Amino acid sequence: MKPSKPAAKAAPAKIGATVTGADNMPEIREGQTVALLQELHILTRDGKMNQDSRRKLKQVYHLYQFIEPLLKEVLAEKDSVSLVDHGAGKSYLGFIIYDLFFKALNDNSHIYGIETREELVARSQELAKQFKFPGMSFLPLSVAESTESKLLPDQIDVVTALHACNTATDDAIHFALKKKAKYMVLVPCCQAEVATVLKKNKGKSLAKSALTEIWRHPIHTREFGSQITNVLRCLQLEAHGYHVNVTELVGWEHSMKNELIIATYKNLPRQRPSERLQEVLETLGLEEMGNRFFTEQVAKQ
């Protein structure tokens, strides 16, 4: 009996080839560019997917299902839509949003990826050129620097920040406030600043309130600091007229940094959330953080 011949290796997908019909894997959506997913290392050269790439793709898809309706709502009111992705990294989110949504638009819609690591920015620029995505730009800036940069338009419709570490999420919020963004989609990560201030002021707070017991032990300081950071962010957004929805991104088995904050500007009343924000800061001994979690009243002073 003759030995069977080894299966031939699959050739890399051609630029622009998309997943269709029977070729469609459950994890890959109809119309996606296969070669792009390979270049992003979500698919291997032979079209396979490992557990890590499945996990990443599940997070991005889950986030996309929240972002897509927001993009459609902007386009219902305007002739184009702009999105800034902060802490873009390898730009999984930006490229998949562009491939699934922006690619089909024939207008001036644009995605801007903001990332400090210049080698990642250069690689993303190469991929955008390779796949003929003219509505994508990548800038080697910090989130804070991008707020003042002349390379970005004065107004942005949608601001995203996926796992922007520590204060980068706050910087993304400040960017969105300055750019008068209609929508923000945020997945905070590694919040340490508030915990540091809680720890520093713990001695003074112990005698003031029994609530200090919530963060007396170091592990509780870290966990409570992370929790209260997002509470303060939500109050700040509400104090600027946004409606805020907080939910879970994906199952805990995929990511411990799992809180998803979606803010929609609705010009809501500001006074009550502004007062509550100041009250929380004072109750927890965080008054010195008023400049970070500023309200419109503070900003005008």
Image (cartoon, rainbow, N blue to C red):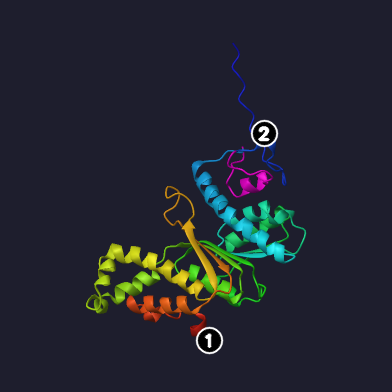
Q: Which residue is mark 2?
A: 22
Q: Given the current orientation, which residue lies at the most extreme right position? A: 106
The three-letter amino acid code for the residue at tag 2 is Ala
Q: Is residue 183 left or right of residue 33?
A: left
Q: Quadrant of residue 263?
A: bottom right
Query: What SS does tag 1 mark?
Result: helix
Q: Quadrant of residue 70?
A: bottom right
Looking at the rendered structure, the secondary structure element under dot 2 is helix
Dominant SS in magenta = loop
Estimate the x, y position of residue 119 in percent, counting from the top left: 58, 61
The residue shown at (38%, 81%) is: 288
Which residue is more in the foreground, 71 or 216? 71
Which numbered marker is on residue 275? none
- Label at residue 300: 1
User: Is 115 on the left-hand or right-hand side of 218?
Assistant: right
Q: What percent of the width, then of the height, locates residue 15? A: 72, 46
Look at 52% across and 41% down and name the residue there.
Answer: 50
Could you classify mark 2 by the number of other residues whose Cα lies within 10 Å: few (under 14), some (14-19), or many (20 or more)? few
Query: Which amino acid lies under the numbered mark 1 shown in the image of this protein?
Result: Lys
Q: Which residues are magenta?
A: 26-46
| Magenta stretch encompasses residue 27 | yes
Q: Quadrant of residue 86?
A: bottom right
Residue 296 percent location from the top left of the image: 52, 81
Left-right relation of 133 to 198:
right
Residue depicted at 60% across the width and 19% down the height: 4
Q: Earlier in the sequence, mark 1 or mark 2?
A: 2
Vertical side of 213 occupied by 20: above or below: above
| Residue 283 percent across, percent down from the top left | 33, 77
